[in-house]
Image: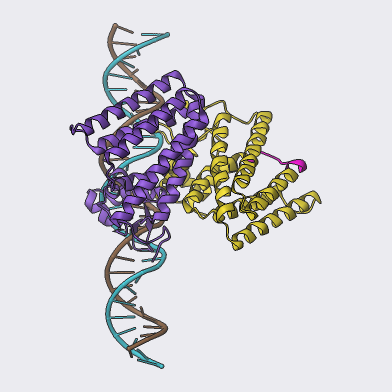
Chain colours: A purple, B yellow, C cyan, D brown
Amino acid sequence: MNPYTYIKNAIIVGHYKPGTRLTEKALADELQVSRTPIREAIKQLEVDGLITPYKKRGYVVKSFSIEDIRQIYNIRALLEGYATGEAALNRTEEALGKIAYKNELYRQAIDSLNREDIETIQHIQRINQEFHSEIFLASGNEHLISMIERVVVVPIIFRSFYWYDEHQLMRSLQVHETILNAIRNHEGDRARVAMEEHIYQGRDDVIAALRKQDILSDSTSESQM
Amino acid sequence: MNPYTYIKNAIIVGHYKPGTRLTEKALADELQVSRTPIREAIKQLEVDGLITPYKKRGYVVKSFSIEDIRQIYNIRALLEGYATGEAALNRTEEALGKIAYKNELYRQAIDSLNREDIETIQHIQRINQEFHSEIFLASGNEHLISMIERVVVVPIIFRSFYWYDEHQLMRSLQVHETILNAIRNHEGDRARVAMEEHIYQGRDDVIAALRKQDILSDSTSESQM
DNA sequence: ATTGATTATAATGTATACAATTAAGGGAAA
DNA sequence: TTTCCCTTAATTGTATACATTATAATCAAT
């Protein structure tokens, strides 16, 4: 695993918690490589918005306020909604088939979970993401896809604090069906709106969970030092 | 000027044309620095989507097809439109004043140009950009601003191939007025739609100009080697 | 002449030494 | 005690040498 992926993962799983100070040397020692590849990783993470320079004393893992999360999810809703609308207009039969297939996998994963099979919530989240990705691919806008990839990183971090209940999973599956049908029928607006609603729902679930667990820092995204 | 800014500028002004092959060593020699800072710049330019790795033989300056430009402008319309709508809803009096001020500067710049004063088209473009930026700031969504900054790089490249006539500048000024008024009156939808239309107009002007000048490569954004 | 394997070379990837910067700590003076 | 300055140490910034890798060129064999 390359340094970028390693550090990003460490942030996502909470090994490097918000506010943690990171230095090139410490990371180089931990990953057993020289500073050069670490620097490369750090620059990328800075672009991703996961860390920020802290004076001349290294970097800190960013904290996100509830307002940050709200803003990021709103952008997600905008971009993913647009992508879904475009997918409904531009899809090929082949792309539709792939989306339908991913959705079938999603249904099975949720069924398994409800039957207390081995499926994990992580697995469901992965399948869910693949469903979304297949839609973005069908939109035919490559630049849009790379934009979405960027705005989706922070939600991934916070989704891991969060445990979906059965009811939420069933509702999520229903919305997937709605989206899939709208794409099948070339209903751009319907597809867009359904996806937007889907994202807003996720936003509110995550924020509610964070409020309850009191996990969040009070900081805004401004550096508070 | 740091290597990143230097190279980016060189690409924007056409010194490094699409398809040009760049190597770390050649850039290091040209900028009289070692490979280390060049590598850093290259990584950023890769994220910006301005260059792509070319096998193990360096990097090439990306070409953009008309379809690429269309897609990128569409994302711009989406993001800037949303930002403008949010600005209309969230603006403070102070933010409104700043937007109005930039628009006044814009009017003056265009007037000067029409009177064949010293103002250049570059100057007008800069003021125009400041007007837009002031709106994004007023939206109150910091993450949105950084997304827009990324999607605006490619349009900047292609705007420089393009010479606005007096009629286009006047129309542009009128749309600015419409947007400003909508923001003043807290009309979110009106503001959003006006901005979207403004961007689409720019998109079509640029594409028409490029078609006429036959400047574009036929490549898609996929690497064609 | 064409194809395949081998070699050479050009490029990125990595490690490390050194330079520059700046924040922090300590000491002296007010 | 507090403030200011100076020193020190920690950290990033840069240059460069070396390692690795993959392309392109060469040459031999069919």
Residue B151 higher or lower than A216, as above or below: above
Highlighted range, magenta: B159-168
x and y percent of residue B200 in the render? 63, 37
Q: D4 and B131: which one is in front?
A: B131
> Horizontal placement of B124 versus B83: left or right?
right
Q: Residue at x 41, y 57 (%)?
A: A221
Q: Residue at x 59, y 60 (%)?
A: B95
> Horizontal placement of B147 versus A53: left or right?
right
Identify the image quadrant of the C terminus of chain A.
bottom left
Residue C21 higher or lower than B74, as above or below: below
Q: Residue at x 31, y 30 (%)?
A: A106
x and y percent of residue A181 in the render? 43, 25
Q: Quadrant of residue A214?
A: bottom left
Identify the image quadrant of the N terminus of chain A.
top left
Q: Residue at x 76, y 50 (%)?
A: B113
x and y percent of residue A29 in the render? 23, 53
